[in-house]
Amino acid sequence: MLEKTTRVNFLYDFYQTLLTEKQRIYMQLYYLDDLSLGEIAEEYGVSRQAVYDNVRRTEAMLEDYEDKLNLFSKFQKRMEMIEELEQLLPTMNHGTSEKMQILLTALKDHE
């Protein structure tokens, strides 16, 4: 469950601007603020089932956006490459490692 929650949180971070305001609110309350479906339903005067349907539909939309755009997948690959490069840094000569450190810092700043 934690893996799914983490994935949905990342997808939400990447694609939230493509969602409606209502979808963003429900996803934020459910995934980021950890409110229950019942709590959200009570706060917005709708049924628990309505909130559940909206959250599930939005999750499917986020996955569909990822299938088409691959922003999260590309981010993960960049992070893996950065980690690998950081592990190689100590084995390089001083001049090369300084330049690589500058490039790594630039990459991290553009995440």
Image (cartoon, rainbow, N blue to C red):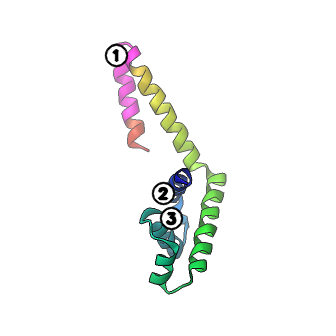
| Badge 1 amino acid | Gly
Question: Where's residue 47, x and y in %?
Answer: 57, 83
| Horizontal arrangement in the rendering, residue 102 relative to residue 67 (left or right) | left
Q: Please state which of residues 49 and 92 is positioned toward the viewer in this rendering.
A: 49
Total labels: the figure holds 3
Image: 110 above or below 57:
above
Most extreme residue toward the bottom is: 45
Q: Is residue 27 magenta?
A: no
Which element is circle 1 on? helix
Residue 1 sits in which quadrant? bottom right
Categorize mark 2 by other alpha carbons within 10 Å: few (<14), some (14-19), many (20+): few
| Horizontal arrangement in the rendering, residue 73 relative to residue 68 (left or right) | left
Q: Nearer the viewer, mark 3 or mark 2?
A: 2
Read off the magenta span. 90-105
Residue that appears at 51% across and 80% down? 41
Q: Please state which of residues 96 and 66 is positioned toward the viewer in this rendering.
A: 66
Where is mark 1, residue-wise?
95
| Inter-mark Cα distance, 1 to 3 | 42 Å
Where is mark 2, residue-wise?
13
Residue 28, numbered label = none
| Badge 2 amino acid | Asp
Image: 10 above or below 98:
below
| Badge 3 amino acid | Thr
Q: Nearer the viewer, mark 1 or mark 2?
A: 2
Per the picture, the main secondary structure of the magenta-coloured stretch is helix
Residue 17, numbered label = 3
| Quarter of the figure with the C terminus | top left
Image: 50 above or below 96:
below
| Inter-mark Cα distance, 1 to 2 | 37 Å
Residue that appears at 42% across and 37% down? 107
Image: 21 above or below 72:
below
